Image (cartoon, rainbow, N blue to C red):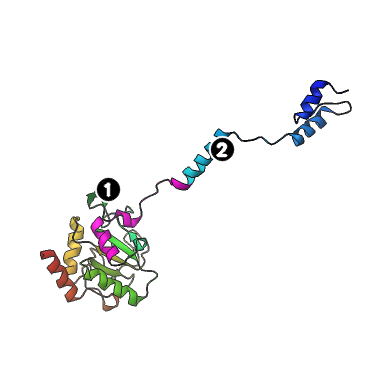
Amino acid sequence: MISPWCAWYERAGGSSLTEGESEQDAKAVSTSKRAPKRLGVSQLLAMIALAALVVFVRWPGPPLPFDTLHPHTQQVLQRLGVEPSRAAQGLGLAPASAGIHGMDGTVNHRPYCAAFDLDISDLTPQQTRALLHRLRGAGLVCWWRVPGVSFPLTTRYGVETGPHIHGVDPFVPHKRRLELQIRDYLTGNNGIEVGRYAHRPDPPAACPQTAAERNLLRRLRRG
Ligand SMILES: [Zn+2]
């Protein structure tokens, strides 16, 4: 005998306990027959807001190396067609480079470094030479760091080095160590401070700065 209450409950989507059914059976039926819960408008809006948050608001990670350069350096590089992604290091906080790639000052309330490293792993030696001359032609101080040729295979901290272009923008305020690199460049040397490569002209294989490139920088600095 089904009570009116049970009939109503069944019609509403539930299940009633009738003769012959155990309580457990009833529970199983009750679970399988239960209508899916419908989302309320507020729940739906909350989910949309959460999805929008995930898509549009990204947690700010560390700045890209290019973003840690002085706006002047950024402009020169972009004018030369150097993609921002090529900057492998600007303001470097790694102990191996904290000296030379340390902070040189702040601009628009953000720290910058006047030194930069460019990734050249996708360039042929010929393309690297062309890039070096383009950078120097714009007044930037640049060297081709070739491990084992013009640069140590490992840093003094034992970190392996890879081929890259190390550059300095001499036209933005910079630390004394970078000024010494610039002076080394003007005398035809490599700007390396210590070790067996220190203060030497680069070998021809590393495309040393030419006399014309050094004279250009002298003129630009005077002007
Ligand atoms: Zn560097």
- Whether residue 71 is in magenta: the answer is yes
Q: Nearer the viewer, residue 167 or 30?
A: 30
Tell me, yes or no, if residue 31 can be seen here: yes
User: Which of the numbered marks, if any, corresponds to residue 110?
Assistant: 1
- At which x and y percent is residue 140? 22, 66
Label 2 near ligand 1 (CB < 8 Å): no
- Whether residue 46 is in magenta: the answer is no
Helix, strand or loop at disc 1?
Answer: strand
Which quadrant of the view contains residue 30?
top right
Tell me, yes or no, if residue 197 can be seen here: no
Residue that numbered label 2 is attached to? 44
- At which x and y percent is residue 186? 16, 69
For the magenta stretch, what is the residue range?
Answer: 55-80
Who comes first in sequence, dot 2 or dot 1? 2
Q: Is 134 situated above or below 41?
A: below
- Residue that sits furthest to the left in the current view: 222
Q: Quadrant of the N terminus?
A: top right
Mark 1 residue type: Arg
Q: Nearer the viewer, residue 46 or 20?
A: 46
Mark 2 to mark 1: distance in Å?
40 Å
